[in-house]
Every structure is written in C-alpha cells, then in structure tokens.
Image (cartoon, grey):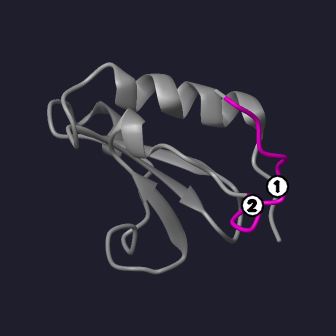
Amino acid sequence: MVAVKHDDLAIAFDFVSFAAPMEHIVYVSFDTGKVYWTSDSSDTFDEDIPDDLETSDRYWRDGWKVDFRVRDSEFSAPATDM
C-alpha cells in the first residue's frame, strides 16, 4: 500500500474545484502515490504524464470536487474531512 501526502491531495482538491466539472482531472498512482494533473483548458500540466494514465487501472481518477473522496482502503493516508 502506498502513502499519499495530505498536501498533495489538498492541492489536487483545489485544482479540480476551480474549474467546470471534468475540465481538470486528477490522477493518483496506486503504485507510487504521485499525483498527476490534466486540464482540457491547458497543456501545461501534460508534460510529465504517463502514457497509460487514462487506460491503466493503476490510477485513482477524479475530476470534480463533489466526487473527491478518498477511503482508507484506497490509500494508506488517514482519511480526513476536507
């Protein structure tokens, strides 16, 4: 099980919150805990994106703040109310 930094998740939450639903997408690697950001409105975030990001089952994906929930069973980071 991989740990994800709380600050990384908080920044990811802000990122998806400041756009229309599904305009900004956040992916978190189940293998490394690294957070990746993509945006329909800018290619700035697409520089370090893995090729299999959208096709692999090794990433947790979210694109809207209402759906932004993390369960203890998905990551080893303790769940907190955001």
The residue lying at 21 percent from left, 37 percent from top is 21
Nearest the camera: 32 or 64? 64
Q: Is residue 7 above or below residue 56?
A: above
Q: Please give the residue where the numbered disc 2 appears in the rendered image.
A: 75
The question of residue 75 being in magenta is answered with yes
Residue 70 falls within the magenta-colored stretch: no
Residue at horizontal 20 percent and vertical 31 percent from the top: 42
Q: Nearer the viewer, residue 70 or 59?
A: 70
Residue 81: give x, y in percent of width and height: 70, 31
Residue type, numbered disc 1: Ala
Mark 1 → mark 2, Cα distance in angstroms: 6 Å
Q: Position of residue 43 (x, y in %)?
A: 22, 37
Residue segment shown in magenta: 72-81
Q: Residue at x 32, y 69 (%)?
A: 54
Magenta stretch, main secondary structure class: loop
Check residue 3 in the rendering and tell me which mark sits there, or answer none: 1
Compared across the picture, whether 17 is left or right of 43 comes to right
Give how far across and how far down residue 52 sits, in percent: 39, 75
User: Disc 2 marks which amino acid?
Assistant: Phe
- In the image, taking residue 79 as reference, residue 54 lies left or right, namely left
Q: Point out the image quarter for the N terminus.
A: bottom right
